[in-house]
Image (spheres, coloured by chain):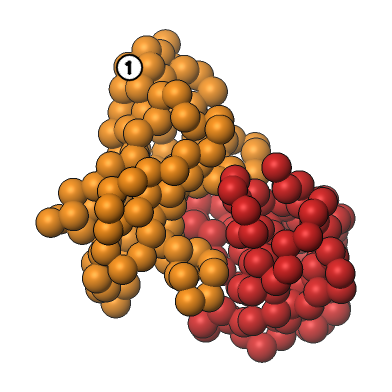
Amino acid sequence: QIQLVQSGPELKKPGESVKISCKASGYTFTDYAMNWVKQAPGNGLKWMGWINTQTGKPTYADDFKQRFVFSLETSASTAYLQINNLNIEDTATYFCTRFYNSGYYFDYWGQGVMVTVSS
Amino acid sequence: DIQLTQSPSSMSASLGDRVSLTCQSSQGIGNYLSWYQHKPGKPPKPMIYYATNLADGVPSRFSGSRSGSDYSLTISSLESEDMADYHCLQYKQYPYTFGAGTKLELK
């Protein structure tokens, strides 16, 4: 069955970096774009952007253009989100989610990774 | 950016009630709107896609509709498992944007 399995929770200090993984299984990884979504505590959902799994080209929402990097390890069917120079406002749960192009929606989601930034 | 305004922000209803949640778009997005159910500690679950289509495995008591720039998610007969936050999302243009959500609680 189709699954997106993300890495475990992270506790980081301000200024550090974190790299979250999202391993896909049960389908051809390069057939579907991978998107990232942020949910800060007490806040709603925010779309961060997406990465083309065929070309590796990322597209970032404006708020995520500076310190955020989407990448792939296609041979391992894995997408990554790296956040550099972490600050307190990066404390959130980060979800990867597959975009189903035939229906135009996010059909499968990772379980989410809680990143806590605290001094 | 396209703004999605969800109403109400929260509501309480009784089991068996018919419930409608609304999402209004600030710009034309056609049918490029989907709905997600989100429970604490879980990932969002797709409920409706392309405004009116039921996602796989979603009970038939859920339905989606559109009237102009107003989109609705309706639950015909509320069950206890339906208590959750519901978010709409537009895919018409970048950046994709979510509504702020409606929190559905049991009365």
Q: Can you say which quadrant of the picture contains the C terminus of chain B?
A: bottom right
Density class for disc 1 (Cα within 10 Å; few <14, some 14-19, many ≥20) is: few
Q: Can you say which quadrant of the picture contains the N terminus of chain B?
A: top right
Q: Which residue is mark 1?
A: A16
> The residue tagged with tag 1: helix, strand or loop?
loop
Up the image or down, B49 lies above or below A96; here it is below
Rendering quarter of residue B25: bottom right
Using the image as rendered, state which of residue B82 and residue A68 is in the foreground.
Answer: A68
Up the image or down, B33 lies above or below B101; here it is below
Using the image as rendered, state which of residue A81 and residue A12 is in the foreground.
Answer: A81
Q: Position of residue A101 (x, y in %)?
A: 46, 70
Using the image as rendered, state which of residue A94 and residue A83 is in the foreground.
Answer: A83
Q: Position of residue A107 (x, y in %)?
A: 47, 69
Q: Position of residue A37 (x, y in %)?
A: 50, 46
Which residue is at 41% across, 24% downward? Answer: A67
Q: Which chain is orange?
A: A
**Does residue B58 appear in the picture of this structure?**
yes
Q: Please name the amino acid that badge 1 sits on.
A: Glu
Q: Position of residue A41 (x, y in %)?
A: 59, 35
Which residue is at 50% across, 64% downward? Answer: A106
Up the image or down, B88 lies above or below A79; here it is below
**Does residue A5 appear in the picture of this structure?**
no
The chain letter for the residue carrying disc 1 is A
Indicate the colour of chain B: red
Which residue is at 56% across, 33% downward? Answer: A62
Rendering quarter of residue A9: top left
Q: Is residue B50 left or right of residue A90?
A: right
**Furthest residue to the bottom?**
B60
Q: Is residue A118 left or right of residue A80?
A: right
Disc count in the image? 1
Q: Is residue A42 left or right of residue A11?
A: right
Which residue is at 55% across, 30% downward? Answer: A63
